[in-house]
Image (spheres, rainbow, N blue to C red):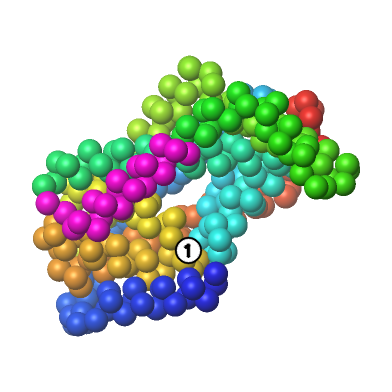
Amino acid sequence: MLWFSLALAAVLLYLTLRGLDWSAFWNAIRNGHYQILLLTVPIASASYFLRGVRWSVLVRSEAQVPILSVFWANMVGYMGNAYLPARAGELLRSAFLGQKGGLGTSFVLATALSERILDAVALVLIGSVALLSQGSMPPALANGVRAMAAVGLLGLAVILLAPFQEKRIVRILGRLPLTEKVAQTISRQAVRFLVGMRSLQNAPRMLTFVGLTAIVWLMDALGASLGARIISQTLDLGQALVLLAALGLSSAIPSTPGYVGVYQFVAVTVLVPFGFSRSDALAYILILQVMNYAVVTFWGLLGLWQLNRSGKSDLGPIPGAE
């Protein structure tokens, strides 16, 4: 998988950089209005904090975990995704919060995966609406949105329906050719996982989650729109949402840490029809990636320090936790 990711990144970088006007690219970088970062960095930080609050809506369905603890674990996860392959940050944030909150990693991982799937569904739906408002777009992007919408809706159905099939799932796991000890461990963890999924069955909790998701993506679109002004370009909120949807879809592709090659190719593909030159599109996405790395690294390292200095929560484990 690593070799495939490296090969894919190399091919996409070649396609992105082929025939690029390097002089225009460096001019865009050198002449950027970087004082705008004083606005985009706080917006990005606030968006990440709200993502932590949103995750806590699911986690706190079983125990009153401090929102700051959820935020710190979330930022450790985002930092892990930025620097490690295979989205290892999802396991990192679940392990940290599961250990510190006494909730059990299986339950926390279930809420984390549920959050990601619901976020992807929301992004696809928002991006689809924004795409329709923009007129013609590359067929590959439109087809990608439709395919991911189908996958996202399937994932949503699994999250909503699987908790009601707990007995059947446990019965199927019990028939696997495993030792009794291993089978019991797997069944116990599966039940914990389903408990995490069940956190979405509460209507007020779901509505809160949906509301926070809308705010998060609007803030991200605002930050992306303001970021375009760094290179003296304009990007309205609808166009920014299309870009964010395309970048979100591309994150599902096996890629190197930081999505090197993938994000550059997607940004050029999406932004050129919006009036960006290829040089400006590349400069724009690189500036946004560097800013995002800085924000994620700062809060992620601070989160590591905060989680390591604090002892395990006094919260007792929820039923079935290890």
Q: Is residue 226 above or below residue 154?
A: below
**Drawn side of residue 134 relative to residue 269, left or right:** left
**Nearer to me, 97 or 191:** 191
For the N terminus, the image quarter is bottom right
Quadrant of residue 65 in the image? top right
Q: Is residue 205 above or below residue 287?
A: above
Quadrant of residue 228 in the image? bottom left
Q: SS class of the residue under badge 1?
A: loop
**Residue at image location 61% in from the left, 38% down from the top:** 110
**Residue at image location 22% in from the left, 76% down from the top:** 25
- Give how far across and how far down residue 2 sits, in percent: 55, 72
**Residue at image location 63% in from the left, 42% down from the top:** 109
Look at the image and tell me whether residue 31 can be seen: no
Q: Looking at the picture, which amino acid does disc 1 mark?
A: Pro
Q: Which residues are magenta?
A: 136-155
**Residue at image location 53% in from the left, 52% down from the top:** 78
Are there few (<14), some (14-19), or many (20+) residues within 10 Å of tag 1? some
- Give how far across and how far down residue 12 sits, in percent: 34, 73
**Drawn side of residue 181 relative to residue 98, left or right:** right
- Give how far across and how far down residue 124 sits, in percent: 33, 42
Look at the image and tell me whether residue 246 can be seen: yes
- Give how far across and how far down residue 113 sits, in percent: 55, 42
What's the magenta bit mostly, secondary-structure-wise? helix
Q: Is residue 38 magenta?
A: no
**Drawn side of residue 198 relative to residue 48, left or right:** right
Which residue is disc 1 drawn over?
254
**Nearer to me, 209 or 136:** 136
